Amino acid sequence: MKHFTSVKDMGPLDKAIQEALNIKKQKYAASDLGKNRTALLIFFNSSLRTRLSTQKAAENLGMHVIVLDVQQGAWNLETRKGIIMDGDKPEHLLEAIPVMGCYADMIGVRSFARFQSKEEDYGEVILNQFIQYSGKPVISLESATRHPLQSFADHITIEEYKTTDRPRVVLTWAPHPKALPQAVPNSFAEWMVAAGYQLTITHPKGYELDESFTQGAKITYNQQEAFRDADFIYAKNWSAYRDPGYGRILSTDRSWMVDGKKMELTNNALFMHCLPVRRNMIVTDEVLDSPRSIVIPQAANREIAAQVVLGRILKGLPKNE
Ligand code: SN0
């Protein structure tokens, strides 16, 4: 594996799942693979699970890890090309990225959608600059349009908990006080269809996602209908994708919150969320604290997903001199 930015970099998914389940049984079996290798994890946005699980996965493989929070201590980075740098940003990504590449064998990047320009976000301008200018393998730690390490962990989790071959998976929009990216739902939809599951997406009118991610999924505005017979309920808020209104909140309708009554419509479904989750906005305490919630084992699988990806990238690196 060279870069990891979407499900398309994974190859056959049954093989990836097998690898993940093997790693889960023996996390330290390849603790020499990353000897004298350094992973640089760079965060333009906050992180808890991604930061901890990716660092842990790298350490399981014997790697060194450097974590850089751009907002805390690094020079404020300019990202626009051709700009006169007379403002508050002393360093340009065009120098910062190749410099980072000098110190690392691979670079993980978190850079959320900024909602200033849909073209820039959906063109993955920041992630692509890392790929273009670092000279090193790049791992998405959530980019503007996708969160593939999360989706892979979601896939592993569903494989572990499913009781039928092709479970019914429902992605439901839920209300949130802030405008959030579409990366998690885009990536989840794309990955679930690739995994061969029966995917239904439900959201209020106006929250349609980019169709290139949702092809193969059933889409309905009727949440109750979507919940009927579901095996997995995956809740997530996202902001509008369609224009006009890209990156905006169109609805705060609390009736979309996942609660115990809605869960009763399902086929005894399990509840999933990528976290962080806003209690009693997205989902009630009752559901989140119930035995049907698998958000913690889901988060635990982030380490396994990252270890599969980092291990594959390590195997593809040129020999250390
Ligand atoms: C991010 C998102 O893409 O939705 C990261 C999810 C893994 N979530 C948030 O930014 C939540 C922030 C909040 O205020 O709840």
Image (cartoon, grey):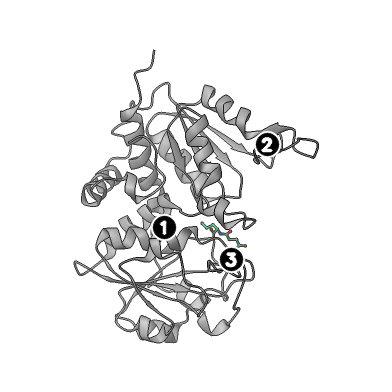
- Other residues around mark 1 within 10 Å, as few (<14) / some (14–19) / many (≥20): many
Residue 199 in the image, given as x and y percentages of width and height: 32, 70
Residue 82: numbered disc: 2
Contact between labelled residues 2 and 1, with CB atoms less than 8 Å apart: no
Residue 187: numbered disc: 1
Q: Observer-nearest residue: 54 or 101?
A: 101
The image shows residue 71, relative to residue 146, as above or below, that is above
Q: Nearer the viewer, mark 3 or mark 2?
A: 2
Q: Dividing the image into four equal quarters, which quarter contains ligand 1?
A: bottom right
Mark 3, residue position = 246
Q: Nearer the viewer, mark 1 or mark 2?
A: 2
> Which badge, 1 or 3, is on the more N-terminal residue?
1
How far is the residue under mark 1 from the one under mark 3?
18 Å
**Residue in the picture at 21% in, 47% down:** 15
Label 2 secondary element: loop
- Other residues around mark 2 within 10 Å, as few (<14) / some (14–19) / many (≥20): few
**Residue in the picture at 57% in, 51% down:** 120
Q: Nearer the viewer, mark 1 or mark 3?
A: 3
Q: Which kind of residue does numbered mark 3 sit on?
A: Tyr
How far is the residue under mark 3 from the one under mark 2?
26 Å
Q: Which kind of residue does numbered mark 1 sit on?
A: Ser
